[in-house]
Image: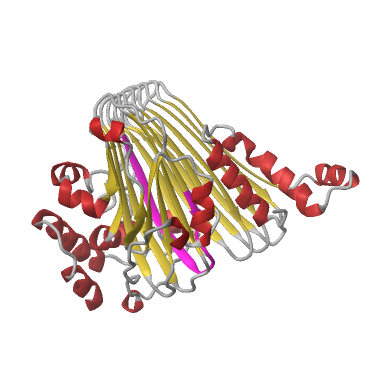
Amino acid sequence: MTQFNDQLAQVQGPEWLSAKRRESLELFTTLEVPQESVEAWKYTRVDVDFDALRPHGKRDVVADVSALPASVQERLSGTDVGAFLVLDGPDVVYRTELPAELAAKGVIFTDLKTAVEQHADKVQQYLYSVVPAEVPDDTTIAAPGTTPSKSPDPSEGKFSALAAALWTNGAFVYVPRGVEVELPLGSFRVMSEAGTYTATRTLVVAEENAQVTFIDEQDSEALPGTYAIGAVELVVKDGARVRYVSIQNWGEGITHIQRQRGDVGRDATLNSLVVTMGGTLSRTEMQSYLRGQGADSEMLALYFANADQHFDHYTLQHHAAANAHSDLLYKGVNNDQAVGVFSGMIKVDLGAQKTDAYQKHRTLMLSSEARNYSVPQLEINANDVRCSHGSTTSPVDQEALFFLRSRGISKETAEKMLVTAFLEDVLGRVPLASVVKYIEGIIAKKVGAA
């Protein structure tokens, strides 16, 4: 994998970051690609020839929105973000400035490459603190006389190590103590060169009692043999509130692998929404580490897989402190020959008494040829908790479909109505009207009713 060493040699930056990149690449070379024998990757295999991977080409800044891809133009016309970045491959090609009143309060919103240069102290303090190159040891602190849970398999960090070593750019958000950012901030990532890879990184930091919403969107045309590898670090300090939305709508042929993890402090709240609609193979991990007492994590997701798409979602609700609450609701739709995978774990440490945790995964099957694998799990080492989990898989209600068809509604429109209704209790929890409207539009295209 000499090409990765060559690429790393061309990346400029401070010595602390270069050292971390080298360390991460060394780790990457020692790890195997996760196989089906690894529990967390039991139903998903990533076939990748690392020796053949080449980085996405560089892109120049454009002067006007009209020079951006049509899909991005359409999306930007309907968004209500206060400021945004557009990245094509490794480069920021367009941006809008943060409102002056927020900048005056100390809010920082820029690309991560610029942040390393202009805000090195803050980036160095938090970068890699939530999603390191290696897999975090989320071993539950076991009760006396019991056996701790098995640490994650080292190979689970193969792609995280690559992202940590070779990330080229991404977004950086910093909100000082007590500052509330009312309008969302956003990043729109696109790729435009087939047969390449892009590694990105997002770092969101909300200091004590701060508040911010960040929308992270990915979109492209069909790009055979292309890889999007990423990491998202969410630092939610005591009393802070962060809402993070990820909308993945890559084109056909793209393999998407991303680890998203939040570190949630005392009386802090992390609301996350993961939307998976595009790409040929997608593996998304969403993890919440409830570090402080009274921490709260809401984890929502919806996905719609059709044709031969393979969507894998891996989640972790790790309760490390007492009196914390987490609520997970994942809902998906599988059509044609698509495959859906969900593996979710609620972990409760020994001292995490009064934990209140819920996990629910539901799948709607539109085709008898589609497949679904669902593995909800609990690991509890405290004796005063309330935890529950559940999973259901069911076909379309034929009576409801017949009722709509008998009223003169086409099959495509009827299915869109039933799918939208099925996903509504997730969308109904999202207080972002433009985001919900955009997602409903993607769903309509998926069922051919747009």
Q: Main secondary structure of the magenta part?
A: strand
Q: Residue sitting at 21 percent across and 42 percent down?
A: 126
Question: Can residue 361 be seen?
Answer: no
Q: Is residue 389 above or below residue 178?
A: below
Where are the magenta residues, as a range? 247-263
Q: Is residue 421 left or right of residue 131?
A: right
Q: Is residue 263 left or right of residue 391?
A: left
Q: Residue sitting at 30 percent across and 31 percent down?
A: 101
> In x, y percent, where is residue 9?
16, 70
Magenta stretch: residue 156 in it?
A: no
Q: Residue sitting at 57 percent across and 62 percent down?
A: 309
Q: Quadrant of the N terminus?
A: bottom left
> In x, y percent, where is residue 129?
23, 44
Count of marks, rendered view: 0
Judge by depth and name the residue closer to the eye, 398 or 420.
Answer: 420
Judge by depth and name the residue closer to the eye, 385 or 126.
Answer: 126
> In x, y percent, where is residue 62?
37, 61
Q: Is residue 374 left or right of residue 86?
A: right
> In x, y percent, where is residue 360?
55, 37
Q: Residue sitting at 40 percent across and 62 percent down?
A: 228
Which residue of the protein is positioned furthest toward the left in this rendering?
15
The colour scheme of the drawn protein is secondary structure
